[in-house]
Image (spheres, coloured by chain):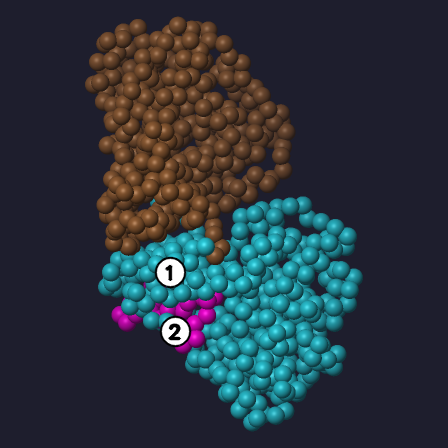
Chain colours: A cyan, B brown
Amino acid sequence: MIKKYYLLSPGPTPVPADVLSAAAEPIIHHRTSEFSEIFMEVTEGLKYVFSTKQDVFVLTASGTGAMETAVISTLCAGDKVITINGGKFGERWGQICQAYGVEVKEIILEWGEPYSKEQLVDELKANPDVKAVFAALSETSSGTVYDIQGYGEVLAQSEAILVVDGISGLGATPCPMDEWKVDVLVAGSQKSFMIPPGLAYISFSPKAWDFVEKSTLPKYYFNAKKYKKSLGKQTTPYTPAVSLIIQQKKALELIKSLGLEKLFEHHRILGDATRAAVKAIGLELLSKSPGNILTAVKVPAGIDGLKLVKTMQGKYMAYIAGGQDPYKGKMFRIAHLGYMGGFDIIIALSALEMTLSELGYEFEGGSSLKAAEDILKENWE
Amino acid sequence: MIKKYYLLSPGPTPVPADVLSAAAEPIIHHRTSEFSEIFMEVTEGLKYVFSTKQDVFVLTASGTGAMETAVISTLCAGDKVITINGGKFGERWGQICQAYGVEVKEIILEWGEPYSKEQLVDELKANPDVKAVFAALSETSSGTVYDIQGYGEVLAQSEAILVVDGISGLGATPCPMDEWKVDVLVAGSQKSFMIPPGLAYISFSPKAWDFVEKSTLPKYYFNAKKYKKSLGKQTTPYTPAVSLIIQQKKALELIKSLGLEKLFEHHRILGDATRAAVKAIGLELLSKSPGNILTAVKVPAGIDGLKLVKTMQGKYMAYIAGGQDPYKGKMFRIAHLGYMGGFDIIIALSALEMTLSELGYEFEGGSSLKAAEDILKENWE
């Protein structure tokens, strides 16, 4: 049989065909007015998605590069910070900080457990000298969304800044930077921004910018001040990934034409449909606070989770994500993020049904698809 | 919601992403050795799909242009022919012949009815002066495949030639030109050849070539002799669609790597799955001899067939085909042709289920998907 490849992972995500083909457009030099015009249109579009009046800087880097920029552009050696670690990416905040000699008070959560703003208030009371709190909007390893709005309210009352990893969540689930008082917000191009990986985005509140001015951690490529200075000249400090920026212009046109509110609703529908579908065949969610970015599902008892993921990815070429250590083989993750449609979920579920049936799991064939269809069809507007 | 466009029609058909992007390659001049190398590789690849040792000519035209080439390059004014008309495209053979003063004995079949080689024997006995028989491998308007092998056996015993419209069928269902004694075989690029529309292909047996030598019908652009002469110089008589030829080279690489036998089996599986699925929700096939190219399904009683097609195409953007006059509103057609995978069928069926449910048809939700999955998963190799 002809087998097509379906990207159903929480990054990279599918890219619209007209955005893909934009990469074949002639490469223009990045020190030209022609490039500057495209570049400024992109940064304006990014401000729309970030819901901020502040500058959004474009880094030629993966999302982790923007996370590092957030740390090293705002802090000083010996600063104390809180990191909320509910999975692989929460853990990464701590690792980056520690690499630069920042003292980390790490809040280690069970994967999928929420963390309330009240808990954060208590933690800050116990650690009044904290300079920053690092959180994730959506923890990609567990499919959990956190209460960024609540954390913003808490930190607005303190001297500390709130730094948020919005890499998988921004654009798919609400996180209005200015309104929610997020001080540093980080994003990546290969998620809801609907282009290939290679660009990362970052923005700083005025409060965070005071930190930037005082920051003494060593930095060069990831120095936010350089990006600000270059943006004043309508360009980037280093040669940017021109073709990706051209693609981002194209994809932002789509994003703006749909509108953020509709995109959130879109992801909500896909999330609802996926959750209802997996529950319909007796599967359990990993997260107690599941987001609409991806759905992490526990592998049912008696089923080989590694084989499940391998079969879906290898045989059916439905490239969902497996569980990351320590949940390897214990869960799998179906993304509904970025340029996905209702039928992408149907494909993921159909591949899941065929795989589960092959692995001997007992369920009523077609019933997860029926459950998803019921929600999709009600909302198909 | 984000809505993606799914091409599920029997032409144009989906084009692989790397074939699409090949269209963005620099356009080369068609009177260069560089082009000739590509062009000759394409014509060799076409011979493989046609299963012939004869030349296959590349026309920059739609499939109908190749049909016209078949008529006007082989016949003389006043010649008498038989056309087997089981639908829109069988009818077209007659219309082209009549436009050139060819006398047509038209065999008008109910759509979906087969036509046996024994019937053809009788028809030829009644019309011994016939110069050619025009048939279709797969009649796209009804999803019916005809017994080309049988017709070839019959005509090999006569002076007349067998001219076959392989536009939607060739490459998806067997029709080895030399072995089955097809005298003129016609194909189109936008079907199983996996590229966009714009190129048509035609090949002549030695027996047919004798007809070409004697043909007196007026012709210029569609003169087979010019294509033969130019092919000797490794080029085309008129400026060809260079980018499409470059794409065809790329797509033929995929076709050759899969192999014809596997492609036939692939289409057989998709056809079986689709037929089983629609039957599982109580729907009926139109054709008594359904092919694996597309499945024509009768609209169930009480359901508005025009609305069904409009909803699938417009709301769910699952672009299946409706019925053509006189079956408009009475049937719809799901293609499983060319670069389709198992999940393309799943998408078509899921859109069908959501649409039927919306239109008030009663059935068990998910059951068509289950039926398709059962066949797909058994065969997913």
Query: Circle 2 sits in a helix, a strand or a loop, which is it?
Result: loop
How packed mark 1 is, by other alpha carbons closer than 10 Å (few <14, some 14-19, many 20 or more), is some
The residue located at (32%, 21%) in the rendering is: B85
The residue located at (59%, 80%) in the rendering is: A152
Residue B302 figure quarter = top left
- Does residue B202 appear anywhere in the picture? no
Disc 1 chain ID: A
Residue A336 lies, in percent from the top left, at 45, 61
**Residue B220 left/right relative to A181:** left
**Residue A8 left/right relative to B148:** right
Query: Circle 1 sits in a helix, a strand or a loop, which is it?
Result: helix
Q: What's the distance in space between the residues labelled 1 and 2, CA to CA?
A: 21 Å
- Does residue B363 appear anywhere in the picture? yes
Asked if labels 2 and 1 touch by Cβ distance under 8 angstroms, the answer is no
- Near-viewer residue (B195 or B35): B195
**Residue B353 left/right relative to B66:** left
How packed mark 2 is, by other alpha carbons closer than 10 Å (few <14, some 14-19, many 20 or more), is many
- Near-viewer residue (B44 or B270): B270
Q: Which residue range is magenta in the image? A: A286-312
- Near-viewer residue (B377 or B330): B330
Q: Is residue A301 magenta?
A: yes
Q: Is residue A120 magenta?
A: no
| Mark number displayed over residue A375 | 1
Disc 2 chain ID: A
Mark 1 or 2, which is nearer the eye?
A: 1
The residue located at (64%, 77%) in the rendering is: A183
Where does label 2 land, which residue? Answer: A286
Residue A85 lies, in percent from the top left, at 50, 80
